[in-house]
Amino acid sequence: MSQWQNLGIHKKHLERHKQANANKDTQFITQLEQRMAAGEFQMLFQQDTDYPQQLLSLFDPPPLLIYHQSP
């Protein structure tokens, strides 16, 4: 944060920005959980047995996949 202050951005502005981002993150996570519970999509982690082997062979595979499965 001090680098931003070196640019002349006041500490109070930085704190407000940080809090606004935290609130947006919380809202996003809540919406994500609600949509998952409604069955709109699923999440798959690298450790899950259904994680695609082709992705695991990549140098830097995505740790999380979010997908929608067609009926």
Image (tube, helix red, strand yellow):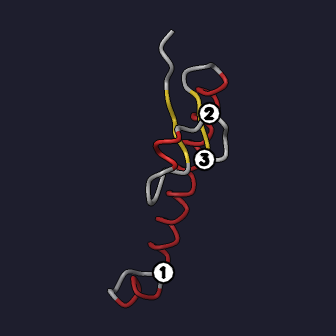
Checking the image for residue 53, the label placed there is: none
Residue 58 in the image: above or below residue 3:
above
Measuring from the top left, give residue 6's x and y in whole percent.
Answer: 37, 90
The reply to whether callout 1 and callout 2 are in contact (CB within 8 Å) is: no
Q: Relative to 9, is 16 on the left or the right?
A: right
The residue that appears at 49% across and 24% down in the rendered structure is 68
Q: CA distance from mark 3 to mark 1?
A: 39 Å
Query: Where does label 1 land, which residue?
Result: 11
Chain-order first, disc 1 or disc 2: 1
Residue type of the residue flagged with mark 3: Gln
Q: Residue furthest top?
A: 71
Q: Residue at x 60, y 47 (%)?
A: 46
State the residue in front, 57 or 71: 57
Tell me how far mark 1 sits from mark 2, CA to CA: 46 Å
| Disc on res. 50 | 2
In the image, taking residue 61 as reference, residue 48 lies left or right, namely right
> In terms of secondary structure, where does tag 1 sit?
helix
Where is residue 32 drawn, in percent x and y? Answer: 58, 35
Task: State which mark lies toward you, 1 or 2.
Answer: 2
Q: Nearer the viewer, mark 3 or mark 1?
A: 3
Q: Contact, CB < 8 Å: mark 3 with mark 1?
A: no
Label disc, if present, on residue 46 of the rendered structure = 3
* Secondary element at image label 3: loop
* Residue at position x 32%, y 86% in the image: 7
Up/down of 39 relative to 7, above or below: above
Q: What element does badge 2 sit on?
A: loop
Amino acid bearing label 1? Lys
Which residue does the image show at 52% across and 71% down from the upper left?
15
Residue 38 point in image, percent of width and height:
63, 19
Q: Residues within 10 Å of mark 2 (few under 14, many from 20)?
A: few
